[in-house]
Image (tube, grey):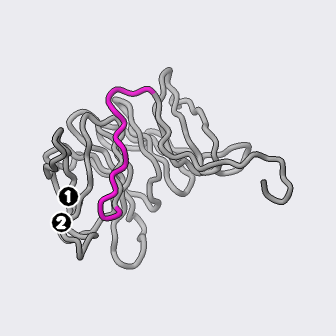
Amino acid sequence: MDGGSKRPARLMMYDLDSTVDGPEVGRYDLFNHGFAVRSASRPYVLVGTDLDRPHKDKWIAAVGADGTLRRLFPHSWVPQEHRFGGPAVEIGQSLVYAGTVHHGHGLQPGGAYVVRRSLNGAVQWQYRTDHPATALDADEDTVYVAYNSGALTALDAGNGSVRWHTELEVGGAPTTALSLAVAPQGHLLVGTVDGRILECSLRR
């Protein structure tokens, strides 16, 4: 309670999940770069190779049943460009993940991205924006991305084009999503920074 208010306290809604195929993989935090992959067939982690320079030379790796790591491809597909990891989802034989580009001068316009890459590292598409993603989930056709600006965007899973875009509001007040989960019957569950769980229709 705050100031005698009788309104219940709300918690930030992280890690919201719905009924999905495959295990929900936990957040691995190596060198402070979490890489939570939803609906994954195996665990993936984002690892660095240099303890003295943890922001450089990061790789996406698969975790074997015995706990060993197998590097799949470098996290950044642009040589000498440093990138910070974000939420991810596995679609078929590919990963869709969000992140930001680090230039040493803060986040620059267009410095946040969502990218789809096959497991050999090939970039299928990328979508650039000014705001970091806070959550991401997908169905067979669409990738849903929430941003720290309060925006929610649906991207075509095949080519990365925008299908629709909206600003999240509750009772006319803006809010920000911290987690997303595609639910049955064409709905998207949205966990917000103020502790709410919203149900949004995917039909636009």
Q: What residue type is labelled 2?
A: Thr
Nearer to us: label 2 or label 1: 2
- Write the residue at 55% across / 47% down: 177
Q: Is residue 94 left or right of residue 155?
A: left
Placement of 96 over or under 147, stated as above or below: above
- At mark 2, the secondary structure is loop
Query: For residue 181: magenta?
Result: no
Residue 50, above or below 46: below
Q: Where is residue 193 in the image (x, y as percent from the top left)?
A: 60, 51
- Residue 204, how many percent across, how many down? 53, 31
Indicate whether residue 24 is drawn in magenta: yes
Residue 57 vs 99, above or below: the answer is: below
Q: What element carries label 1?
A: strand
In the picture of the structure, the residue carrying the numbered disc 1 is 59
Q: Are marks 2 and 1 in contact (CB under 8 Å)?
A: yes
**What amino acid is found at the position of numbered circle 1 in the picture?**
Trp
Cα separation between marks 2 and 1: 8 Å
Q: Which residue is drawn at 23% across and 70% down?
A: 56
Residue 118 at what x, y percent from top left?
19, 43
Q: Tell whether 168 sits left or right of 45.
A: right
Query: Magenta segment, which residues?
Result: 19-32
- The residue to which callout 2 is attached is 49
Q: Is the magenta stretch mostly helix, strand or loop?
A: loop
